[in-house]
């Protein structure tokens, strides 16, 4: 394959078609079903599907035999299914599965002046707005990679592209579609996921693992109603103090270390080695990317330790609270209850269902003062650790990274979860996995001022095309 021609094809298609389509896509407030219970009636999801499917249908004219269908199982979100036949001398019984999603996180407050979640703004090489990088670009990048190969007459295996509409809600529908489409999908030997992150925009970053997640709402109740604090304090135990005691069973308040051994897993030496290499490449960028308040420091300045903290060690965050009036209207009242929403990230190989049971027992047994303590758990999601890399894929990724980015690739565990990865790993145990994405420093997925770094989108598209070429002749 002619790399200059590849780069030119990708650049031209991104500039003339993909960026304008992503601008239209950002305008559609197609929140994931967890954040829009009336998503069917509102029609935003259908508009997003129509937009992506319309563009893809036009491109399929250059791919003889390719098909596109919008799958819609009863009571479930839609799914785009594209099937592109093998080309050239590639084996006809092989398959590559390429994945992305088109649902979005909610708006979030704090967008800068002139920016907004549904207001696309193109500034230099950044396209601001919700969903462009997470994960609207994926369909465009995946199909463009295939088109680039056909443009040069380069062989590739059969390619199946799945674009789901419920990833931000934990992908509750995807396993049903994979089962429904099993005969049409076949047995992929390579799975390409375009929904992960990158630690900088200078190189191709490959995701080696994803953390799991358990969480829920912990509530401590001591009274049926609030009472005057001057009368009750010292007699009625504070629900907040009890809450702090209970959380201290889980987390060391000084260091943030999770205490029970049940939430830990052995970190493979290969993952430690990769963390050291990634930390050396990133330097202080490992922590500089965050919007720190003045004077605040990271928990460590050992980059490798931080990378492993966010990928292989359990970590707790309180993401919400109830039972607390706003400061401006908080009177002298001993409140009847305190509640917090907990998010406990787990190492990739810890069983989330087992961890959820351990967590609930830990938080609710033997409550201080006999307080009413409940823990309403949410769906538990196990993490994922990539299988050992096949030599052909390691070589292919290295060549693709050098050609598209001008640097060797880097490998790193991600702190977030992509719930379906474990499911696909079980469904296709013989497959190799290429997990990557465009969510880099300050791109702020799920938060305000989210943006897509367009040059990275282009280079990543070219890199995927290169890997598909190597896959066909491995």
Image (spheres, helix red, strand yellow):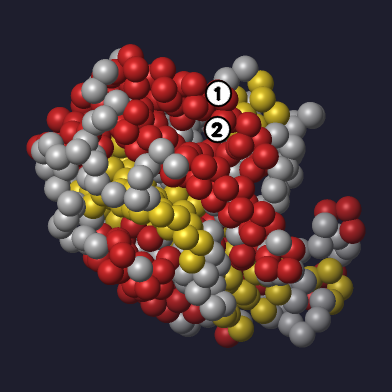
- Tag 2–tag 1 contact (CB < 8 Å): yes
Residue 304 showing in the rendered view:
no
Q: Which picture quadrant has residue 271?
A: top left
Q: What's the residue at 81%, 62% (across, down)?
A: 325
Q: Foreground residue, 35 or 472?
A: 472
Q: Quadrant location of residue 25?
A: top right
**In the rendered view, would you say 52 is above or below 405?**
below
Q: Is residue 285 left or right of residue 92?
A: right
Residue at mark 2 to residue at mark 1: CA–CA distance: 6 Å
Q: Residues within 10 Å of mark 1 (few under 14, many from 20)?
A: few
Q: Nearer the viewer, residue 104 or 290?
A: 104
Query: Alpha-carbon neighbours of circle 2 within 10 Å: few (<14), some, or many (≥20)?
Result: many
- Residue 438 visible in rendering: yes
Residue placed under numbered mark 2 in the picture: 18
Q: What kind of element bears circle 1? A: helix
278 vs 290, left or right, is: left
For the point 83% across and 54% down, the residue is: 327
Residue 167: horizontal and vertical position, in percent? 49, 58
Q: Is residue 424 left or right of residue 212?
A: left
Q: Secondary structure at mark 2?
A: helix
Q: Which residue has dot 1 on it? A: 15
Please state which of residues 339 and 110 is positioned toward the viewer in this rendering.
110
Please identify the quadrant where the C terminus is shown. Answer: top left
* Quarter of image, res 409: top left
Across and down, in percent, residue 46 comes to 64, 59
Q: Is residue 231 left or right of residue 185?
A: right
Q: Nearer the viewer, residue 169 or 272?
A: 169
Give the residue drawn at x 70%, y 29%. 121
Expressed as whole percent of the image width and height from the top left, the position of residue 135 reads 51, 45
Image mark count: 2
> Residue shown at 52%/70% (left/top)?
72
Quadrant, the N terminus: top left
């Amino acid at each position: 394959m002619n790399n200059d021609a590849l780069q030119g094809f990708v650049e031209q298609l991104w500039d003339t078609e993909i960026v304008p389509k992503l601008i239209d896509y950002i305008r559609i407030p197609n929140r994931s079903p967890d954040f829009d219970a009336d998503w069917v009636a509102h029609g935003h999801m259908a508009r997003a599907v129509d937009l992506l499917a319309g563009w893809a249908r036009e491109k399929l004219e250059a791919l003889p035999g390719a098909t596109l269908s919008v799958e819609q199982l009863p009571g479930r979100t839609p799914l785009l299914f594209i099937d592109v036949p093998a080309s050239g001398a590639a084996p006809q019984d092989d398959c590559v599965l390429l994945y992305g999603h088109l649902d979005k996180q909610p708006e979030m407050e704090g967008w800068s002046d002139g920016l907004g979640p549904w207001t696309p703004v193109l500034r230099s090489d950044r396209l601001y707005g919700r969903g462009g990088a997470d994960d609207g670009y994926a369909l465009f990048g995946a199909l463009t990679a295939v088109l680039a190969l056909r443009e040069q007459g380069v062989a590739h295996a059969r390619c199946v592209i799945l674009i789901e509409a419920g990833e931000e809600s934990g992908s509750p529908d995807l396993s049903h579609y994979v089962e429904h489409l099993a005969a049409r999908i076949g047995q992929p030997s390579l799975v390409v996921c375009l929904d992960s992150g990158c630690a900088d925009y200078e190189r191709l970053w490959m995701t080696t693992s994803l953390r799991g997640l358990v969480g829920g709402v912990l509530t401590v109740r001591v009274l049926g109603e609030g009472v005057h604090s001057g009368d009750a304090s010292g007699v009625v135990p504070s629900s907040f103090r009890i809450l702090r005691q209970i959380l201290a069973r889980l987390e060391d308040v000084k260091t943030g270390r999770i205490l029970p051994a049940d939430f830990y897993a052995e970190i493979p030496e290969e993952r430690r080695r990769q963390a050291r290499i990634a930390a050396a490449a990133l330097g202080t960028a490992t922590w500089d990317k965050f919007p720190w308040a003045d004077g605040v420091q990271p928990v460590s300045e050992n980059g490798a330790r931080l990378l492993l903290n966010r990928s292989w060690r359990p970590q707790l965050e309180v993401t919400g609270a109830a039972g607390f009036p706003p400061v401006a209207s908080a009177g002298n009242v001993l409140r009847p209850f305190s509640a917090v929403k907990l998010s406990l990230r787990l190492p990739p190989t810890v069983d989330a269902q087992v961890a959820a049971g351990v967590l609930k027992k830990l938080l609710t047994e033997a409550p201080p003062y006999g307080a009413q303590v409940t823990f309403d758990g949410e769906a538990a999601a196990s993490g994922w650790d990539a299988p050992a890399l096949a030599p052909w894929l390691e070589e292919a990724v290295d060549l693709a990274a050098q050609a598209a980015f001008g640097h060797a690739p880097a490998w790193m565990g991600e702190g977030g979860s992509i719930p379906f990865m474990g499911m696909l790993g079980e469904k296709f145990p013989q497959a190799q996995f290429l997990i990557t994405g465009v969510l880099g420093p300050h791109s702020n997925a799920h938060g305000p001022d989210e943006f897509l770094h367009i040059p990275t989108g282009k280079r990543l598209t070219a890199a995927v095309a290169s890997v598909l070429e190597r896959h066909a002749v491995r």
